Amino acid sequence: MNQSLAETIFWIAAVACVIAEVAILRSTFAARPANRSELVPASSRSGELAWAVIPALGLCAVLVATWQRIEARQSHTQTMNHSDMRHSMQMPSVPPAAPGS
């Protein structure tokens, strides 16, 4: 996969994840507490916030690690590209093999 395609896919995925996380966090923080009933179990407000914030932090860590890997790959590719180098010294050539050997 070429570098620009990898970066494009990364940014599309990152934007989609940010939009989804913002929607999740918005709905969590904007939700009004329901009337408690003895018949229906309800989770605590702090539990709901934890289940919304912890995955968001984990996703941020994955996105940062992925971006670092993409950048490392790009710098490695640039380092390994020797096509524009000019060799000032003649490279030794290997003599052709003798027929019948």
Image (cartoon, grey):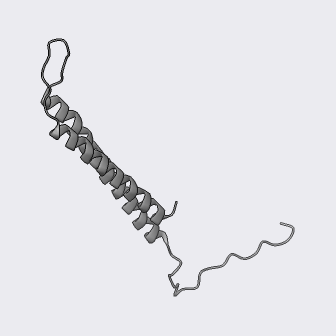
Give percent across and percent down for residue 35: 12, 23
Tell which of 96 and 19 is nearer to you: 19
Judge by depth and name the residue closer to the eye, 44 or 54: 44
Residue shown at the point (16%, 40%) measured from the top left = 30
Of residues 83 and 96, the one drawn nearer to the viewer in this rendering: 83
Residue 51 versus residue 86 in the image, above or below? above
Residue shown at 19% from the left, 31% from the top: 48
Q: Residue at x 23, y 33 (%)?
A: 51
Residue 73, placed above or below residue 59: below
Tell which residue pokes out farthest to the right in this image. Answer: 100
Q: In this view, does 22 lie to the left or right of 11?
A: left
What x and y, as percent, mark residue 55? Answer: 27, 39
In the current view of this chain or complex, which residue is farthest to the top?
Answer: 39
With 59 as the anchor, is 28 left or right in this view?
A: left
State the image coordinates of residue 98 (x, y, percent, origin top left).
Answer: 81, 72
**Residue at the far front in the pictured view:** 35
Q: How many marks?
A: 0
Question: Would residue 61 be visible to someone looking at this image?
Answer: no
* Residue 35 in the figure: left or right of residue 64: left
Image quarter where the C terminus lies is bottom right
Q: Kindly indicate the quadrant of the structure image that contains residue 39.
A: top left
Residue 68 visible (yes or no): yes
Residue displayed at 12% across by 20% down: 36
